[in-house]
Amino acid sequence: MKKKEVIVLKFGGSSVANPEKIKYVAERVKSFADMGYKPVVVVSAPGDTTDDLIKEAAGISANPHVREMDMLLATGEQKTIALLAMALWDMGQKVVSFTGHQLEIITDGNFSNARIKSVSSAKLVEALKKGFVAVVAGFQGISLKGEITTLGRGGSDLTAIAIASVLNARCKIFTDVEGIFTANPKVYARAKKIDIISYDEMLEMASAGAGVMQARAVELAKNRNVSFEVACTFSRKKGTIICGEDKLLEKLVVRSVTEDRDQAKINVSGVPDRPGIAADIFEALSDKNICVDMIIQSSAKSSPESGTPVNDISFTVKRSELNRARKILGAVRKKMRLRDILVKENIAKVSIVGSGMKTHSGVAARLFRVLAKNKINIEMISTSEIKISCVIDEKNTAKAVKVIAKEFKL
Amino acid sequence: MKKKEVIVLKFGGSSVANPEKIKYVAERVKSFADMGYKPVVVVSAPGDTTDDLIKEAAGISANPHVREMDMLLATGEQKTIALLAMALWDMGQKVVSFTGHQLEIITDGNFSNARIKSVSSAKLVEALKKGFVAVVAGFQGISLKGEITTLGRGGSDLTAIAIASVLNARCKIFTDVEGIFTANPKVYARAKKIDIISYDEMLEMASAGAGVMQARAVELAKNRNVSFEVACTFSRKKGTIICGEDKLLEKLVVRSVTEDRDQAKINVSGVPDRPGIAADIFEALSDKNICVDMIIQSSAKSSPESGTPVNDISFTVKRSELNRARKILGAVRKKMRLRDILVKENIAKVSIVGSGMKTHSGVAARLFRVLAKNKINIEMISTSEIKISCVIDEKNTAKAVKVIAKEFKL
């Protein structure tokens, strides 16, 4: 460990949910300071505070104004920084807290889902130089017009990565799990913690359902090349380091298997085979903020009625958004005279991720064979350079994860 | 009413304690906008929020760091401005909220008890020009160094008066009483609401125990010559206008009678008659932030023991601070070899206030006579140009208020 090294420590809402936890976090921060680090601490709103604030807003308006919602939500992290700083002072640690406004975390002004444009390091550097720990409100920033703006889901992770980037510092994201695992330990008891993983693998895992971090924060880390560690707040064990692929000693063909049960399949049949039709369908969905995950289009065949070529399009959406998707497609169907819209709810997506896949052939075949051998039918397949996803019947999820984990020795 | 006149409306914590009340306040604000006014609304933290935040801090630290306490408390008003703005948007009213930081309410940086140095009007003027209602977080500002600072008790009133001053605007302070009364209506049922009163009279009343407004805000109004109205949030009746003495058509000899039961008397006897002794005693108290109200020193007499001249000093403190005062004086007594420290708890102060007193003689005599006629003993007397205060036995308080109110036809 280098003495006087700046380190960014991020603690999520569940780590600061009550006074005891805040004091515990303060102790952890103090221990880093005592080791000679210069900590910058990024925190989220305590526990259920954000949900409580959303409820309060709902008591005032069915459709709260988005600017004022950000104004309201930003109070959550401001509470945490004040309380955590008090706890640190009580331990004899010099500390200073900063709101996003005070630190000049400049955003693009997009309420409720802002992007960080820049972070001014001057105040942090000054505080650290004087021996203060800096405690920063995550999730919030200020636009160039002076508007308080929040960063959306996973926003505090974004704040931590952005600060680590401008300070050129190490970054530790503390959470309630011990790191990233080769498989969900609740499903596969022999899953192992991964020591080191690349940004891309982590991104693919996030999109494949591994819920530890939002993809946005990992993307930012990748773009700024900020390696960081995901570790557990309430344990002293090493976590998982996420870094550039060049830093991986060993590129595993398959790093992990993930499952995602929040999936539903929609099949639209009789789609006229002419340009722009698919765009119309998916624009209608994205206009209402429904994310479509896998999309498969079968090749054109003749319509039994008209004889003109038609396609079948299948895709998956989040199960929680299925009803909304169905309504939207009902309207599209009428307008475009599509034949049928079929829905299957009880599906799941299992994926394997590994950056070594790029240079290894036969991984997909091996995956399909192990599923077949175990009588697990594959309904849809999608692949990226470093990921293969299969949609299967939900009831086979745990079994699939286990046999895949064994097959690839995860 | 002039069209498009700017008006500052201030609502206290009890007026925005829950969603229903916030919606009600929004309606009141909207009605001013609908009448053609351009409202700037200043609000406090909702109901018990400030107390709840103080409790939360106490759960972290027995002696919370003062900077971080201000950071914490400032979230209270930020919540109100967001919720009130949401309610106004819901009624179709264009509105924009501002924290003290955003509005550049610049303070002297004195945490927990800051003074406002300046308020930038640019953002308010811009918002009002565009037809927006401005909602401003009271009680908070930002120092030139960018530190969030709160203004102490009555801070939101200060914010409202300061804004009215820079905008050269009318100002209405909404509260839970209908205005300023000639006597406490709970004690004297026939008390009348005062239509108009001078800053000085209001100041004397505040210091004499009338709890409607803190003296600081009235002082600021006097210094900047901002006349304002105190009225009831939940009534449409006219309140009381507080303004410069030059605007009073009629200077009443006695405007009101007030009572203050939060009083205790301390008598220090055998104080050596030499310079600096009284200063030592009262410095010891003020060092610990104990406010001394009335002070009476008897002329020097000889000490029975030493024969050297000694004084008796009597003074009043808040009853709630009596125990702390006693401890401090115990230490002083030892050091200075004072004879006795006697305490009387059950006293009250009744005062009459009126700017006409300056030019009328005989008011004091009339007051003392009416008390004597009713067998109410006066223990201490203090006077200012426009106020006479008497300390009496607490059990006589209500009786004194009634007979004084009748005598002076209040």
Image (cartoon, coloured by chain):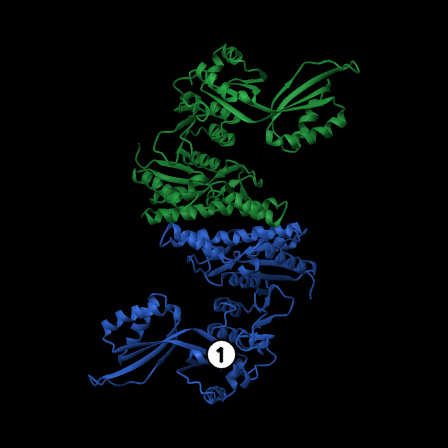
Chain colours: A green, B blue
Nearer to me, B370 or A360: B370
The residue drawn where x is 44% and y is 43% is A17
The residue drawn where x is 45% and y is 28% is A225
Nearer to me, A215 or B345: B345
Rendering coords of residue B45 (x, y %): 52, 56
Tell whether A95 sits left or right of A75. left
Tell whether B247 sits left or right of B155. right
Instruction: Judge whether A310 appears above or below A240 on screen.
Output: above
Rendering coords of residue A35 (x, y %): 30, 37
Instruction: Judge whether A80 appears above or below A323 on screen.
Output: below
Looking at the rendered structure, the number of numbered marks drawn on it comes to 1
Q: Amino acid at mark 1?
A: Ala
Rendering coords of residue A258 (x, y %): 49, 23
Tell whether B100 sits left or right of A32. right
Residue found at the far right of this picture? A306
Instruction: Judge whether B176 appears above or below A66 on screen.
Output: below
Dot 1: chain letter? B
Residue found at the far left of this picture? B306
Residue bearing the label numbered 1: B398
Instruction: Judge whether A164 appears above or below A81 on screen.
Output: above
Nearer to me, A255 or B255: A255
Nearer to me, B337 or B384: B337
Rendering coords of residue B7 (x, y %): 62, 62
